[in-house]
Amino acid sequence: MSDCIFCRIAAKEIPSKVVYEDDVIFAFDDIRPQAPVHTLIIPKAHIASLNDMPDDRTDVIGHIFAKAPEIAAAKGIKATGYRLVLNTGPDSGQDVFHVHFHILGGRKMHWPPG
Amino acid sequence: MSDCIFCRIAAKEIPSKVVYEDDVIFAFDDIRPQAPVHTLIIPKAHIASLNDMPDDRTDVIGHIFAKAPEIAAAKGIKATGYRLVLNTGPDSGQDVFHVHFHILGGRKMHWPPG
């Protein structure tokens, strides 16, 4: 069994509110939402952070962004707008070391982005 | 001549502080920085927003994320950490309708991300 909480969520060993799933990515609602819609999109494969991602694996990120508008639509925020956020390393506030994109919307987002 | 300011920046018709450039992407410093490091990464091809991006064009986003750690390293924030942000649509605060990723670092980033 993996020690990584997001690997375990993607494997459904830990329950989550699933928003989208296919062979390579998994999307589920953040348990500490910062906006009316706050969903996380992760690759199923364990990659600790963007700094640890081999160049030949970034196709999974292309796939995440191909599906992001669909995930936004499923949550009702595709037309109203949404922010995608990826944290990498200490200053960013990255807390779980499995690459995860935040998608937030359902309210006006502010600037700066944190 | 394009009406799009980011197309014109990428074409060097408008000067910018260039951070990185290759055949498909262009990175330059934001003129209204929200952190000690605040750089924008754009595809050279004009795509208004993520909602307007055909699925078969998301390889350019994979490429942006493949190069992002290198761009972070060039700005001295790869190890300290950085946040990548993409705004799409009205609620997000997207202001220029040419896909652009913000990369921010050089200080502790806060939560929520705006």
Image: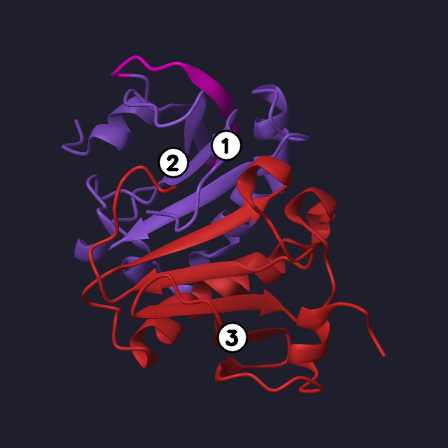
Chain colours: A red, B purple
Q: Secondary structure at mark 1?
A: loop
Q: Position of residue B94 (x, y in %)?
A: 23, 46
Q: Is residue B21 magenta?
A: yes
Q: Give amino acid for label 2.
A: Lys
Name which residue lies at 49% across and 20% down. B19
Against B59, residue A41 (above or below) is: below
Against B114, residue B24 (above or below) is: above
In the foreground, A87 or B100: A87
Name which residue lies at 32% across and 64% down. A35
Q: Give amino acid for label 1.
A: Asp
Q: Is residue A18 visible?
A: yes
Tag 2 near tag 1, CB within 8 Å: yes
Residue B65 position by quadrant: top right
Q: Which residue is mark 2?
A: B44
Residue B89 position by quadrant: bottom left
Q: Is residue B56 visible?
A: no
Q: Position of residue A76 (x, y in %)?
A: 25, 77
Q: Which mark is residue A27?
A: 3
Q: Are marks 1 and 3 on the same chain?
A: no
Q: Which residue is mark 1?
A: B23
For the record, the magenta segment spans: B13-24
Q: Position of residue A53 (x, y in %)?
A: 71, 49
Q: Position of residue A26 (x, y in %)?
A: 57, 76
Give the CA distance from mark 2 to mark 3. Answer: 29 Å
Q: Give amino acid for label 3.
A: Ala
Q: Secondary structure at mark 3?
A: strand
Give the mark toward the camera: 1 or 3. 3
Give the CA distance from mark 2 to mark 1. Answer: 8 Å
